[in-house]
Every structure is written in structure tokens, then in C-alpha cells.
Image (tube, rainbow, N blue to C red):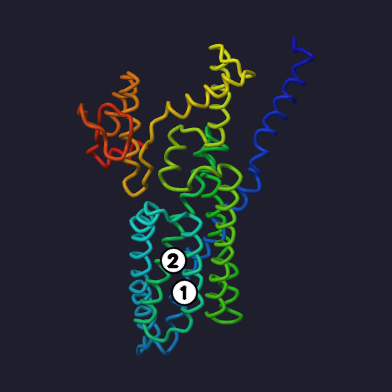
Amino acid sequence: MDSPFRPARRLARHRTNRRRVRPFGATHHSSLSARAFFFVAFFIVGQQIQPPLLLERSSFGLEEDTETKTQEKIALTAGLVAIPTSLVCTFVMTVGYLSLSKRGLSDETCVFVGGVLAAVSFFVVPMTERVWQLCVVNAVQGAGCGMFMGAVQAMPSKYLAIVFPKDIASGRGVYNLMMTIGTMVAGIPLTMLYQSNGIAASYWCTGAAMILSTIFGVSFSRQIHKKLDPGCPDTPSSRRALEKGAMAVDEFKTMLAKKLIDTLEKRNYHLWNGRAQKCIMDMIDSSFPVLRAWDDADSGRAHLEDVANLYLSLGKMDELHRMEHEYGMTSAVGKNPSGSTDLGSSLTIHDQTAIDNAL
């Protein structure tokens, strides 16, 4: 027999879950990112339908004796002018974006610079009159779209890891679904504008869509960084740490404060006593050695070496062996790491790839 209190319990659970999500403004933030993915689909569709229509202009000199030969030459040229866009976009989206991020460039900056560069190129394309001019503009367009897409695809990782840590795959599926819907819809306004106002209007529509996508992407980055985790830098290293189970900075600070207070009270550090208060502060100041600062350029190599040496000094051999395995460390005794203080032995990391993979 069902308990008469079961519906009330379900309602209480539902209200509790709502309270967990609302402080993050999950729905609002998700919609911003989803809109960015929706409008970027105009670029994908435009790259498929617009170049052949643009190349029909007589200024490109692709006319042949027959209509069939002309269309064949246009199709071939459309494929060739797409190569600069594809190559540059792929390179910038992978190698270029990761390199810029490791040097401290935020996702917000990458979205803004890449989006503006791509949008401007869409407005410039209709002004080209030669194939080489179109190739140059397409290369610039590929650079902008590559930087934009690299950042936009990476941004949801941090958000989903904090708000929906157990359902990251489904969250990413929602963004991909919005892009799919965008590709289904984008062709309608682009084709209608071409038929009514010419190819220039179609390209301008794509440029306007990139501007909207940039606005939503930058807004998403700002609000997530501000509301979810203002104390954590928005870098590939911080996102990978969250994906691998690290706590959000604010959440860890709250847990740390509670843990410290509980430990002090259990060990008879009477917090009401002035002398005990000063003693506690002096102990905190003297108990934590200075670690070398995290540097994204080498994925925090020096910082991780200092953390490993702390485990060694504490005798936490299980954690130490785990770090040795994950980061490819080797140990040496008798010399402190350069730049660190109060560490008795030293461990050094030799495998940079292991660091990048283990964060």
C-alpha cells in the first residue's frame, strides 16, 4: 500500500532539485549558448550554397561555350575556393586555439575576435571580383570561424561539469541538436534573400547571423564565469580539472571552511578565546609553504612538482605514487625545487604529454 506521505516526499525532492539549479540560472545560461550554436549553423549552410551562386558573376571569368561546361567549371572552382576556408579553419580551431588558450587568452576573447573577423569577411565576400581575391577572403574567414568554433565548442564543458556533472554527454547533445536545427532552418532565409535581393544579401545575412552568434557566445562566457566560478580562470586546464572531478572553487572554499572549523573544535581549539585565535592564525601562516605559481604554458609543471613534494613530506605515499604514475615523475632527495620553499625532497616531471592528459 502506498504511503500517503509519498507524494509529499516527491514534491519536496522536486523543490529541492529546483533550488539547486536556480542559483546558477541554468536555463538562461543554456539558452545563450544554444542560440550561439543555432546561429553559427548559418556559416555551415552558407559555405555549401553561396560560393557557386557567387561565382556565376561574369567578373570571375568562368563562362564557357555551353551552360553545362560553365556549370562544371563553377562547381570545380567552388570546390577549390573552399579549400583555404577548410584548411585554415581546421588548423586554427585545433592547434591555433589551444596555443592561444595556453598563453592565457580567454574563451571570451577568442569568441569575440573570431566572430568579428568571420562576420566582417562575410560582408566583404560579395565585393570580390577575382578567384584569388575570394580565396584570400575565405582564408581570413576560416581563421575567424576556426577561433570562434574552437572556443564555442569548449565553453559548455565548464558549465556542464558544474551544473550537470552527471549528465555532461546529454548536455552537449542539446547544443549539437540546436546546431542541427540551425542547419535545417538556415537555408530558407539565405535562399529567399538570394532570389529577392541577390547573392550579396544572402552573404550579409550570414554575417549578421555570425554577429548574433558572437553576442550570445560572449554573453554566455561572461555570465558563466561570473556566476558559477568567479575565482577560477577560464582555461583548458581548469575545464579539464572540472571534467575529471575537481570541485568548483567556491564549493571547495565552503567545504574547506567547514572542515577547518570542525577540526579545530574537535581538537579543543576554543574559537572564543583570543589567544587561541591568534595561535590558529599563526599556525595557518607557518603551515603552508609557498608553491610556485601555476603556468598554463607548461600545464602547471612546477606547481604540480611542489604539490608532489608536499605529499612526500606528509608521508602520503599512496597519493605520491599516484602522481608519479599520472605525471611521469622521478624522485630525487637532497635538493629543493627552484622557487619553492620548505620542501625537503624534490620530484621532477619529465613527460609533458602526461601532464596534459592527466589534468
Mark 1 or 2, nearer chain start:
1
Residue 219, relative to residue 299: is it above or below? Answer: below
Q: Position of residue 153 (x, y in %)?
A: 47, 51
From the viewer's perspective, is 23 left or right of 301?
right
Disc number placed over residue 321 in the picture, else none:
none
Badge 1 vs badge 2, beta-carbon distance below 8 Å: yes
* Tag 1 secondary structure: helix
Q: Of all residues shown, which one is farthest toward the front?
A: 275
* Tag 2 secondary structure: helix
Count numbered badges in the picture. Answer: 2
Disc number placed over residue 144 in the picture, else none:
2
Residue 226, relative to residue 184: is it above or below? Answer: above
Alpha-carbon neighbours of circle 2 within 10 Å: few (<14), some, or many (≥20)?
A: many
Amino acid type, mark 1? Ser
- Residue at x-position 35% and y-position 90%: 65
Q: Position of residue 284 (x, y in %)?
A: 48, 27
Residue 137, relative to residue 213: is it above or below? Answer: below
- Is 22 in front, or is 238? 238
Q: Position of residue 14 (x, y in %)?
A: 71, 29
Q: Could you tell me which quadrant the C terminus lies in?
A: top left
- Residue at x-position 51% and y-position 63%: 112
Residue 110, relative to residue 69: is it above or below? Answer: above
From the viewer's perspective, is 308 left or right of 177?
left
- Residue at x-position 36% and y-position 86%: 62
Alpha-carbon neighbours of circle 1 within 10 Å: few (<14), some, or many (≥20)?
A: many
Q: Quadrant of residue 336?
A: top left
- Give how far apart the Cα atoms at labels 1 and 2 are: 9 Å
- Is 17 in front, or is 259? 259
Amino acid type, mark 2? Gly
Q: Which residue is mark 1?
A: 121
